[in-house]
Image (tube, rainbow, N blue to C red):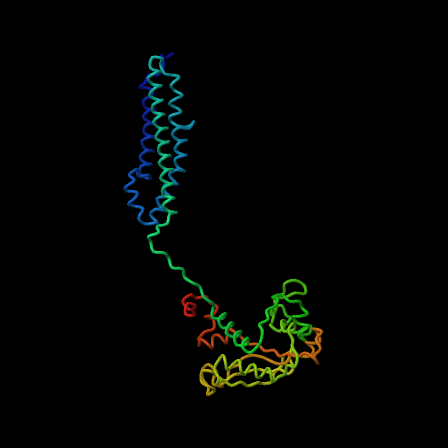
Amino acid sequence: MTDGLKPEDLEPDAKLVEKEFFEWQKRFQAVFNPDREKLVDSLKAQWERASLLHSAEAALSELKIEHNRLLGKKSALSGLKKKIGFVNPTYKSVVGQRVQTLERNIKAAIILAEDRLKHFIAELSTERESIDVTMPGRRPRPGHLHPITLMRERIEDIFVSLGYAVEDDREIETDFYNFDALNIPEGHPARDPQDTFYTTDGFALRSQTSTVQIHAMDRGITMAHLKGTLAEFVHRLFGPETRTRFRPSYFPFTEPSAEVDYSCFNCGGKGCRICKGSGWIELGGSGMVHPNVLRAANVNPEEFTGFAFGLGIDRTCARIYQLDDIRLLFENDVRFLEQFR
């Protein structure tokens, strides 16, 4: 039987605890520089401040792990404390005091490190959120309308100035208003799912503007009104020298029907690349609302009439702004769109 452990028997364990404590302090100093003046100098750039804040927050999280490693149940200090009970009574007091002092120093260092980190994080957070009123502000970049929207508004302005009203209606229509009421029978290609987006049974996205006109009819409208309206429209859109022509055509929801062309605004009808040498550019289809369409909507065709026409706003926009490629209108290239401010 021994007389118990002597202080020198615990010296290797004590040095191991001191070594771990010293190494932790060294690592902590590398992450957190206590020299506040140097830190202030490094805060001149915002990204540096954010980097420091991230490092400090990471160090605070790591400090909790280090606390358990240095002071936890499985730490070298805990093993050293367990051996005190086996120390010779003569030396137990001295050894106990040394171990307690070592433990107090470690705890005090960790608490101090935690307090300094929290204070440092709070200062950096405040600086990050603060606003220097002496700094020049950032000028907001105002948005602007898309060229197709500009073209649509320009067209609307022309018709409103002619005494027309802009009618906007539902985006989803029944099969009746999409097809039956427009004199489009069952089996017609326009009803094919490849051409029409169906939502649920009996409903589909509005496939054409003619579904709206059913809800807005007038009295005494003739083909002369249609021709006069389109002639004035192209005059105001492309210039007073622009001419129109009507070619017979067929559409199931109009009778009579016609394709509308206007003289090329680029060459004046002489023939060029834009009009493909014909001197004319197609505007779109037109015609008087078919009597069957009116009857399907319970409208008396002997009393109410109307005309219809359609044009591609994107194609018209490309021609007005002399775009070489219509796809520019749909690519959302900011360099292109900024030209329409």
How many numbered marks are there?
Answer: 0
Q: In this view of the protein, which residue sits in the foreground, 190 or 202?
A: 202
Q: Residue at x 36, y 16 (%)?
A: 87
Q: Position of residue 339 (x, y in %)?
A: 41, 70
Q: Quadrant of the N terminus?
A: top left
Q: Position of residue 127 (x, y in %)?
A: 36, 45
Q: In this view of the protein, which residue sits in the foreground, 56 or 28?
A: 56
Q: Is residue 261 above or below residue 120?
A: below
Q: Residue furthest bottom?
A: 270
User: Which image quadrant is residue 231 in?
Assistant: bottom right
Q: Quadrant of the C terminus?
A: bottom left
Q: In this view of the protein, which residue sits in the foreground, 3 or 177?
A: 177
Q: Is residue 332 left or right of residue 247?
A: left
Q: Position of residue 321 (x, y in %)?
A: 45, 75
Q: Is residue 38 left or right of residue 155?
A: left
User: Which image quadrant is residue 104 in?
Assistant: top left
Q: Is residue 89 above or below residue 82?
A: above
User: Which image quadrant is residue 273 in?
Assistant: bottom left
Q: In this view of the protein, which residue sits in the foreground, 64 or 189?
A: 64
